[in-house]
Image (cartoon, grey):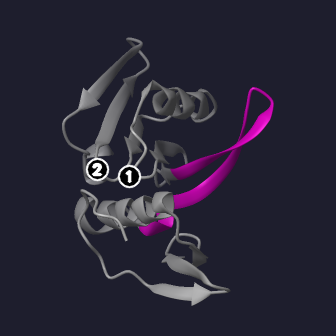
Amino acid sequence: MFQINLPPYNTNLTEQNGHLQIFDILRKRYVELTPEEWVRQHFIHFLIEHKGYPAGLMASEISLSVNGMKRRCDCVVFRRDQSPLMILEFKSPNVKITQDAFSQINAYNHTLRVRFLIVSNGLSHYCCEIDYEHQKVHYLSEIPTYSQQL
């Protein structure tokens, strides 16, 4: 579908009502294949297959309230105790990652207070670690494995 900067995986595609669908292993159902969804599915598989994240501790389209308005996080990774560890925000490959994407994910983080934030358009990936004690954000050169974060 789109050339992206993530490892390929064996996608499960189908067509329904004239629309291409991709199987989401987290939601365990087919969803409409959009450019953003292409990035989401590849990134989820990258985290599971290459970084050791347990699929059972990941969720797509998490609803939350931000300033009294309902919002949805693209993906959240949890610790084994079910506390949120990471928020992921995905954009289409043709969408440049700007400060707006970071503002969006940061707004979600006011509610969840996670350790890591990731923004990706499939071509560029940004991962930052939040240091709440010193009120600093550290941009990481690499996405840590699940075991490195525990």
Number of marks: 2
Write the start and end of the magenta stretch as one range: 55-75
The amino acid beneath tag 2 is Leu
Q: Look at the numbered discs 1 and 2 and tell me whether their residues touch, using CB distance below 8 Å.
A: yes
Q: Amino acid under label 1?
A: Pro
Residue sitting at x 35%, y 67%: 45
Query: Neighbour class for label 1 at 10 Å: few (<14), some, many (≥20)?
Result: many
Going by the picture, which residue comes out furthest to the right? Answer: 68
Q: Is residue 81 visible?
A: no
In the rendered image, which residue does mark 1 sit on? 93
- Image check: 124 left or right of 38? left
User: Element under label 2?
Assistant: loop
The residue under label 2 is: 123
Residue 109, x across and y down, in percent? 55, 31
Q: Residue at x 48, y 35 (%)?
A: 114
Taking depth in this image into account, of 117 and 114 the one nearest to the observer is 117
